[in-house]
Image: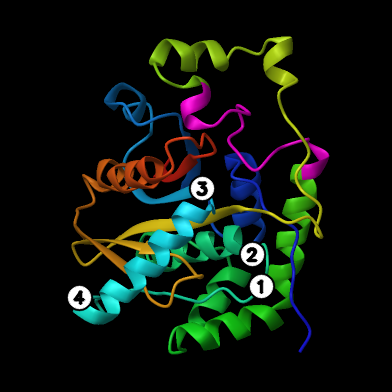
Amino acid sequence: MESHRWLPLEANPEVTNQFLKQLGLHPNWQFVDVYGMEPELLSMVPRPVCAVLLLFPITEKYEVFRIEEEEKIKSEGQDVTESVYFMKQTISNACGTIGLIHAIANNKDKMNFESGSTLKKFLEDSLSMSPEERARYLEKYEAIRVTHESSAHEGQTEGAELGPKSGSYWEANFSSLENVLQQLKPTESHMDCHVEAPSIDEKVDLHFIALVHVDGHLYELDGRKPFPINHGKTSDDTLLEDAIEVCKKFMERDPEELRFNAIALSAV
């Protein structure tokens, strides 16, 4: 069986928003950078927020935790509402697109789609499918693949990286509001900090997940996992803060790692 592999997509709001626009999503909701975990930094994120995408490194520590978590849930069980839209990932490097699909699909009632939207059609066609069937459907869904490739190439052309527009990860420089404001100044050093996105054949150890609110609970949606992960209660008002608490746990498991950042889907 032929292996499916796409070019990696950047965690860059400009790239992701253009991608969603090309798929027919009206820009009344857009992704924005989350510059850090402190309250003063979270206050910079426009509200309301309906989803958070976390980019993180797949390390040995994380893989050990992932296996233990899966075994624990299979043994003890968890409550997952049938309203959650979840799909598996069978395409290498497609985690960015799958994260975007998870974010939009679980907030479809809030979104406005253009006439003939490719994304709306995919979501409607796949609504009654299983997570595995949705994955196989995406493999054959040329309109999304072509748009993904175009957006990924755009990120390469701009010299963007698998990281925020600022070119830094959370713990590298964004420890305070002052540092954020300094980083956002269009200085020559700031503009030179970007690196090219990986090529299609390069091994990528960074991965996207989506964090969404469905029926009063916060769900982690990761196509590498067999099922959604219920992280407890949340609300539309507290989703960002609750999602960031989950992000903190990812970071605490790998304290030596700096390659974490997030983007939030906000009303604009």
Disc 3 secondary structure class: strand
| Circles 2 and 1: CB atoms closer than 8 Å | yes
Name the residue rendered at 63%, 53% in the picture.
205
Disc 2 secondary structure class: loop
Query: For the magenta stretch, what is the residue range?
Result: 156-172
Mark 3, residue position: 56
Crowding at label 3, few (<14), some or many (≥20) Cα neighbours within 10 Å? many
Identify the image quadrant of residue 255: top left
Tell me the tag on residue 130: none
Q: Earlier in the sequence, mark 4 or mark 1?
A: 4
Residue type for callout 3: Phe
Residue type for callout 4: Asp
Identify the image quadrant of residue 84: bottom left
62 relative position to 71: left or right? right
Asked if residue 159 lies in the magenta stretch, the reply is: yes
Give me the C-alpha separation between circle 1 and circle 3.
18 Å
Q: Closer to the camera, 85 or 56?
A: 56
Residue 250 x/y as whole percent: 39, 47
Name the residue rendered at 26%, 41% in the picture.
241
Residue type for callout 1: Ile
Give me the C-alpha separation between circle 4 and circle 1.
28 Å
